[in-house]
Image (cartoon, rainbow, N blue to C red):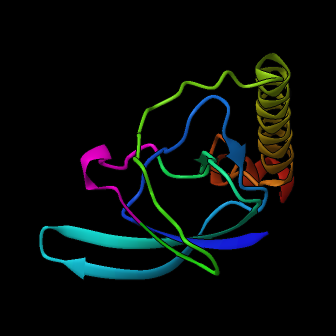
Amino acid sequence: MRTLLATLMSTALAGSVLAAEIPDGSKVGAVLVFPSGAEVTRIAKVSMDKGEHAVLINDLPASAVPSSIRVEGKASAKLEIGSVDTRRLSVPQSGAAAADAERKRLEDEIDRVKDEMAMLKAATTIRPPSKPLEKYSALLCP
């Protein structure tokens, strides 16, 4: 069994349909910032048996520029990187309806609490009388 350490320069989605996914994903190893952008080096470690393999790295940002992808590898045996493919996949979110319902419930709860706070504030605020007391002082103190 050989170990491959793949370094991805920049970010994108590489692999094929029959690819083995990297269980822990890739990690940012270094970042170089330039006036016109940045270079992000991501590192992923993969163990595989002898033979041809496709590796799918699926935790990369959608904002990656596909043409900027560079792949390098180190191995304990001979390693040949045949090609690097990039593609953007639209992955449907499971539970999107449940997430929307939970968001709506939380927004309703926030509105209810805000209304309750406004009512409590109004009930505890001391308001000046609507008519000046001088007009009534003669009635109260003869």
In percent of the image, x 38 and y 71: which residue is there?
A: 40
Q: Is residue 28 left or right of residue 25?
A: left
In percent of the image, x 74 and y 55: which residue is there?
A: 137
Q: Position of residue 85 (x, y in %)?
A: 41, 40
Quick one: 110 or 99, which is closer to the camera? 99
In percent of the image, x 83 and y 23: which residue is there?
A: 95
Name the image quarter holding residue 35.
bottom left
Badge count: 0
Q: Which quadrant would the C terminus be assigned to in this image? A: bottom right
Q: Position of residue 107 (x, y in %)?
A: 76, 32
Q: Position of residue 94 (x, y in %)?
A: 80, 23
Q: Which quadrant would the N terminus be assigned to in this image? A: bottom right
Q: Is residue 142 left or right of residue 48?
A: right
Q: Is residue 110 left or right of residue 41?
A: right
Name the image quarter holding residue 106.
top right
Residue 53 drawn in magenta: no
Quick one: 6 or 3, which is closer to the camera? 3
Read off the magenta span: 62-71
